[in-house]
Amino acid sequence: IGTGAVATLSTAGVLLSPVGDRIIWWGVSTGFLLVLLYFLFGTLTKEANELSGAAQSTFSTLRNLIVVAWLVYPVWWILGTEGLGMISLYSETAG
């Protein structure tokens, strides 16, 4: 959340253009997201496999919902007006 706020509030290009700085912060934020997903699929899944069948099933379902929700946001952000500007503000807001 912190890196997303910095990316959105970046108005002057410190390293690159303002858009370039935002993309760098997006990359940092996405890197942290990948670390969280690694733990979610690695350590936590291994621990969940020691639970009962119903609990394993519930964990898998919730894990997969989290992954989908967490992966949609950075993709939508980079395509939106704060990132590369490939979709309009109207489409970004409606999505």
Image: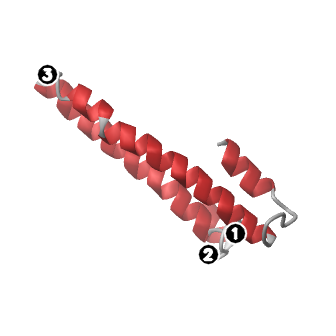
Identify the colour scheme used. secondary structure
Residue drawn at the location 17% of the way across and 21% of the way down: 51
Percent x, y for residue 26? 62, 58
Q: What SS does tag 2 mark? A: loop
Residue drawn at the location 74% of the way across and 70% of the way down: 19
Q: Identify residue for label 2.
A: 87
Residue drawn at the location 54% of the way across and 54% of the way down: 30
User: Where is residue 66, by image quadrant?
Assistant: top left
Q: Identify residue for label 1.
A: 81
What is the C-alpha distance between the residues marked 1 and 3? 45 Å
Work out whether residue 66 can be spotted. no
Q: Mark 1 and 3 residues: CB-CB less than 8 Å, in contact?
A: no
Total labels drawn: 3
Whether 33 is drawn above or below 85: the answer is above
Q: What residue type is disc 1 on? A: Thr
Whether 73 is drawn above or below 81: the answer is above
Q: Nearer the viewer, residue 14 or 49?
A: 14
Q: Identify residue for label 3.
A: 52
Q: What residue type is disc 2 on? A: Ile
Q: Mark 2 and 1 residues: CB-CB less than 8 Å, in contact?
A: yes
Q: Nearer the viewer, residue 54 or 78?
A: 78
Q: What SS does tag 1 mark? A: loop
